[in-house]
Image (cartoon, helix red, strand yellow):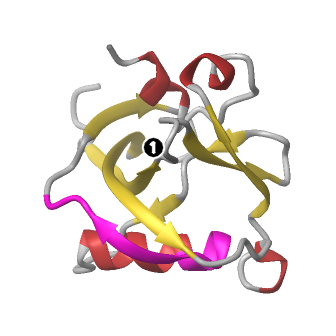
Amino acid sequence: MQGVPCTYRISVKAVIKDDAGRVLLGREKDGSWELPGGGLEHGENPKEALAREIAEETGYAVDWMSDQPVAFWTINKDVGSPTLKWFAFVAYGAKVSGEFRPSFGTNDEVEEIRYVSPAEAKTLKLHDNTEPYFSQD
């Protein structure tokens, strides 16, 4: 698309695994499952943003986060904007503690969470921002 600026919306995601290697996913109001995380605001530190998003969506506290990202992917999605068509996702490994608290009182996003194997994840209705994580080799 000549003449249209290339703009990416950047999001940070958490890859939180249990001792069995299963990955934590949250079920959204629309029934899709996704990795915890959210959009990065201008000037926001990615790891601080991710810790905030995890707390908002799950009630969990972050005990540890990887120094470097563990995965990166992009998607192209029409959201009705002439300039915003691309989304970039940066995922960090994390360990959490606490009790799950549905986000009804904070941001109304995550209704349920569970740890799933990569094989099980592929049978779920994955959010389009999470499906590429499970498609990577």
- Which residue carries the number 1 mark? 82
Q: Is residue 54 magenta?
A: no
Q: Position of residue 46 (x, y in %)?
A: 27, 69
Q: Residue furthest front?
A: 19
Above or below for 60 versus 81: below
Instruction: Categorize mark 1 by other alpha carbons within 10 Å: few (<14), some (14-19), many (20+).
Output: few
Q: Which stretch did the figure color magenta?
A: 55-67
- The residue that appears at 33% across and 48% down in the rendered structure is 91
> Would you say 100 lies left or right of 31 here?
left
Can you say which quadrant of the picture contains the C terminus?
A: top left
Task: Residue at the far left: name it.
Answer: 68
Quarter that holds the N terminus: top left
Please report the residue visible at 63 percent of the width from the left and 46 percent of the height from the top. 25
The answer to whether residue 98 is left or right of residue 112 is: left
**Residue 8: percent from the left, percent from the top?**
31, 48
Residue lying farthest to the bottom in this orientation:
105
Q: Residue at x 29, y 65 (%)?
A: 65
Query: Is 57 contained in the magenta span?
Result: yes
Decide: is 116 above or below 114. Answer: above
Residue depicted at 32% across the width and 79% down the height? 48
The mark tally for this picture is 1
Q: Secondary structure at mark 1?
A: loop
Q: Quadrant of residue 71?
A: top left
| Kind of residue indicated by mark 1 | Pro
Compare residues 30 and 76 and report the one nearer the observer: 30
| Horizontal side, residue 94 vs residue 113: left or right | left
Whether residue 122 sits left or right of residue 64 in the image: it is right
Q: Nearer the viewer, residue 9 or 6?
A: 9
Residue 40 image point, x, y percent: 36, 67
